[in-house]
């Protein structure tokens, strides 16, 4: 299937341009391995040009100080996304393998709210905060604080929910007055490049304020993390890469926002009445988009007294989950993004079985598809929290069921992880669920299936799941510095 509206060129300094030497690479569809087209394959020189353009735009234009211009431009970009919504949907399904069922939700429909949200926030934000008069050291003074843009932002994003994550960085960064170099993941170049084209064709965003650079070489992003001209790196991806980015930024004391991995626990308390709905959040959640989500609950913690009942309920739900061709609106889960990821998931499940886990459902590569990268929805029982399958992020449709003795034990197991991104609690007693949830060291918690996701909700991790918060007011202030002023009153 050919996708007519798309962009293959980089966007640097207000121009849609080819990569140095006209280099391109194949953009492939993970559902059938077909090449849907090309994407510019940037070199280090291209990336350095983009950084220089963003630096110049920050230092020499009024972008960082002109709130009205920014608000107008963000609204223009939002309107452009509305106009090209159907085009962006087709690109997303084809390059991400995202099920059509998720397009109007987390893949595209929900994130389109970010631009209007941050335009409104920039407009109403208290950029200057008065601290009043004081005489702290013998010099009476009037003091206030002004918020200013953090500078040049490198936005480095992954392939699983590219529109969501690109916009969760670009919208607040631009609203704050930063200039941006967006570096999408090699697997999902078109969703990022499309933003460059929309900015170019539909907005008054000055040249250099927004740049998009795609490359087949994932390590090229390192230049963004070491460049003295980049003030801040906003990264979403694996914890391993997050560690490298933090280390690479040390020399220039880079400001970092990191949204990293997760191994979230969904805790079912022993008083639940309907076991099927109690395990539903984990059973469906772990399979949504092939489990390729960092906030997915991949550990199901159930009371030992109700273990078999919970395993049966989860297996029944996961067994009837429709998966297959992402173009088919009836499918809830699609392919795995590439062969490397597929092999990683398969290896982790094989290791789990070798470690003593019992396969209740699935357990391997789905062979009914002759092309593409597919893994069966997989349920593993008899898992203990010390097994690798319970400790490492998997990014596949795999749920493990771990028994616990009492609420304290459930809290201990949930917190026994290097990660702390998300999770959930199900109970017939809301107060009891809340009491457990308050003891879990994670950035988001769902109580009885409540959906926390939204433009105004801060999202991010405790522990090795990250630093800082994305979206909401906190996700705006990540991109702001504060400057304190004083003048004599005497
Ligand atoms: P994956 O495991 O799927 O490659 P990563 O977390 O490694 O996920 O990648 C997320 C994003 O970070 C991608 O855009 C990728 O190209 C980029 N990236 C990978 N390695 C580095 C690095 N060392 N420095 C900067 N960016 C990187």
Image (cartoon, grey):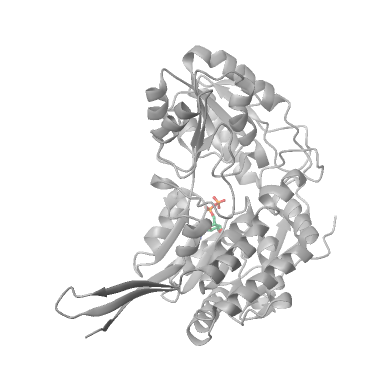
Q: Nearer the viewer, residue 77 or 322?
A: 77
Query: Residue at (64%, 75%) from the top-left corner?
Result: 73
Which image quarter holds the N terminus? bottom right
Establish if 227 lies above or below 383.
below
- The percent position of residue 264, horizontal first and vertical second, equals 49, 37
Answer whether residue 216 is visible to the viewer in this image: no
Establish if 103 lies above or below 167.
above
- The percent position of residue 367, horizontal first and vertical second, equals 74, 32
Residue 156 in which image quadrant = bottom right
Query: Residue at (50%, 24%) from the top-left corner?
Result: 429
Establish if 489 lies above or below 40.
below
Q: Nearer the viewer, residue 457 or 200?
A: 457
Q: Nearer the viewer, residue 356 or 477?
A: 477
Count of number-bearing discs = 0
Answer whether residue 291 is visible to the viewer in this image: yes
Query: Residue at (52%, 61%) from the top-left corner?
Result: 219
Q: Is residue 106 left or right of residue 310?
A: right
Q: Is residue 327 left or right of residue 139?
A: right
- The percent position of residue 365, horizontal first and vertical second, equals 67, 33
Query: Residue at (79%, 41%) from the top-left corner?
Result: 325
Residue 147 in which image quadrant = bottom left
Q: Is residue 444 left or right of residue 142?
A: right
Which image quarter holds the C terminus? bottom left
Establish if 448 lies above or below 93.
above
């Amino acid at each position: 299937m050919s996708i007519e509206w798309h962009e293959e060129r980089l966007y640097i300094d207000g121009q849609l341009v080819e990569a140095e030497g006209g280099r391109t690479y194949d953009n492939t569809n993970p559902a059938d391995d077909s090449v849907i087209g090309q994407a510019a394959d940037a070199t280090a020189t291209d990336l350095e040009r983009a950084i220089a353009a963003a630096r110049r735009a920050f230092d020499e234009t009024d972008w960082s100080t002109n709130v009205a211009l920014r608000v107008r431009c963000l609204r223009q970009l939002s309107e452009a996304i509305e106009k090209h919504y159907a085009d962006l949907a087709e690109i997303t399904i084809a390059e991400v393998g995202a099920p059509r069922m998720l397009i109007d939700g987390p893949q595209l429909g929900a994130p389109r709210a970010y631009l209007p949200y941050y335009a409104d926030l920039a407009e109403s934000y208290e950029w200057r905060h008065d601290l009043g008069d004081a005489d702290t050291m013998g010099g009476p003074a009037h003091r206030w604080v002004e918020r200013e843009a953090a500078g040049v932002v490198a936005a480095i994003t992954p392939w699983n929910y590219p529109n969501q994550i690109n916009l969760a960085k670009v919208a607040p960064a631009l609203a704050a007055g930063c200039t941006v170099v967006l570096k999408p993941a090699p697997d999902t170049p078109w969703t990022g490049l499309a933003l460059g084209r929309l900015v170019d064709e539909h907005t008054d965003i000055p040249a250099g304020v927004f740049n998009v650079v795609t490359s087949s070489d994932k390590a090229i992003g390192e230049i963004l993390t070491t460049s003295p001209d980049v003030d801040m790196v906003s990264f979403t991806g694996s914890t391993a890469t997050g560690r490298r980015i933090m280390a690479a930024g040390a020399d220039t004391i880079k400001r970092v926002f990191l949204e990293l991995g997760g191994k979230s626990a969904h805790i079912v308390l022993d008083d639940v009445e309907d076991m099927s709905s109690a395990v539903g959040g984990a059973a469906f959640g772990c399979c949504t988009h092939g489990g390729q989500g960092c906030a997915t609950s991949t550990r199901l913690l159930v009371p030992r007294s109700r273990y078999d009942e919970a395993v049966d309920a989860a297996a029944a739900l996961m067994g009837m989950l429709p998966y297959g061709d992402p173009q088919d609106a009836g499918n809830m889960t699609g392919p795995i993004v590439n062969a490397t990821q597929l092999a990683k998931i398969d290896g982790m499940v094989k290791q789990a079985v070798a470690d003593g886990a019992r396969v209740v459902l699935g357990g391997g590569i789905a062979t009914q598809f002759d092309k593409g990268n597919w893994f069966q929805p997989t349920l593993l029982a008899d898992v203990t929290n010390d097994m690798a399958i319970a400790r490492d992020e998997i990014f596949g449709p795999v749920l493990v069921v771990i028994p616990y003795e009492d609420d304290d034990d459930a809290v201990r197991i949930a917190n026994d992880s290097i990660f702390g991104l998300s999770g959930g609690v199900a109970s017939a007693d809301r107060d009891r669920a809340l009491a457990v949830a308050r003891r879990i060291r994670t950035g988001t918690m769902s109580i009885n299936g409540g959906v926390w996701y939204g433009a105004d909700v801060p999202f991010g991790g405790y522990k090795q799941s990250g630093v800082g918060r994305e979206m909401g007011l906190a996700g705006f202030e990540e991109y702001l510095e504060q400057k304190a002023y004083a003048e004599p009153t005497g």
